Amino acid sequence: MSEGDTLRRFVFEHAPIRGEVVHLDATWRAVTRRHDYPPPLRALLGEMMAAVALLSATVKFKGRLVAQLQGSGPVTLLVVEGTSDRTLRAIAHWNREVPEGGLQALLGDGRLAITLEPEGEGERYQGIVEARGASLADALADYLMRSEQLDTRLLLVAGESSAAGLLLQKLPGRVDEEDADRWNRVTRLAATLTPGELLELDAREIIRRLFHEEDVRLFEAEPVCFRCSCSRERVANMLRSLGTGEVHGILDEMGQVEVACEFCNQKYVFDAVDVEQLFAAGVPHDAPGRKQ
């Protein structure tokens, strides 16, 4: 059985190859129960959540990784955010019937962007490429090779109640002196894993089945969960950025200012008193607003 909402890293001893396995159960359901996505889009979003969980675990800083797909097809936007604390949130938009099919059928002409945002004083980085390939796994592998020169293989799957992923990555700048064909052999073996096996089997069993002839060290499981980073303070800062004229205009028209988070559906309401406090000099930034 899968381990459920966990990520496990592993390395091939004496070889420049690392890997990860992720399973998303409650984390995946926390996203899908908030929005009624068409089945093909739901599957793509689940694959993207698994991928971001895997990719964010390869980043060596505290902060967040945001993957974004934009397209001209039925699916216009997917955004998944993963953090170094192993939290995820996700959202998708579509504008017409979403057909069954590969990545191009859903996105049309698409772009893939990955943004790295370190906490504190670190420098923000973003890479944007054309989304190429028949699947999300292909597009991400292409991105990593073109932008980072990282040879990567991804297996991604989303079912009705869970999603899962396997990542293999050849470490840059290192040569496998013991076995020059090991990377090719390992990736061919990984390709034999079925979507059902990836969803249902835990990381230890997956590694045993695929790589029982290799010397692999499996690390302890790390918990993964859904968590939205929206907050009253962030919404207040966003309203301040709009300016007093626009916010008071909304207040005059609607009687209150209501902001809903797309990721978690949390609503933040600002009445006339809240708005006055919002723009009053010397008021702490986290003072105004109420959740609903």
Image: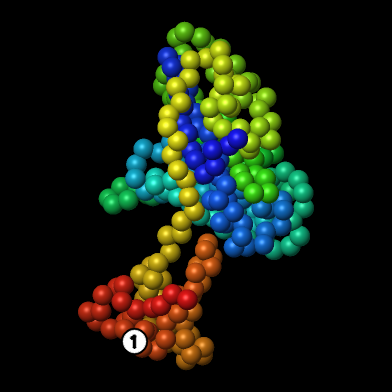
**Location of residue 195 by image quarter:** top right
Report if residue 292 is visible in the image: yes
Report if residue 126 is visible in the image: no
Tell me residue 176's x, y (percent): 46, 13
Tell me residue 260's x, y (percent): 51, 72
Q: Is residue 199 left or right of residue 291?
A: right
Which residue sits furthest top?
178
Q: Residue at x 56, y 32 (%)?
A: 202
As shown in the figure, which amino acid type bears the numbered disc 1? Answer: Glu
Tell me residue 147's x, y (percent): 49, 37
Q: How is the image coloured?
A: rainbow
> What is the quadrant of the N terminus in the image?
top right
Q: Is residue 259 left or right of residue 1?
A: left
Give the number of marks: 1
Tell me residue 213's x, y (percent): 56, 13
Establish if 116 lies above or below 9. Answer: below
Q: Residue at x 63, y 36 (%)?
A: 200
Establish if 144 lies above or below 28. Answer: above
Query: Which residue is tagged 1?
Result: 276
Q: Label 1: how many residues lie within 10 Å, few (<14), some (14-19) or many (20+)?
A: some
Q: Nearer the viewer, residue 158 or 75?
A: 158
Establish if 197 lies above or below 104. Answer: above
Q: Secondary structure beneath disc 1?
A: helix
Q: Residue at x 39, y 45 (%)?
A: 84
Q: Is residue 150 left or right of residue 48?
A: left
Which residue sits furthest left?
282
Q: Residue at x 69, y 39 (%)?
A: 134
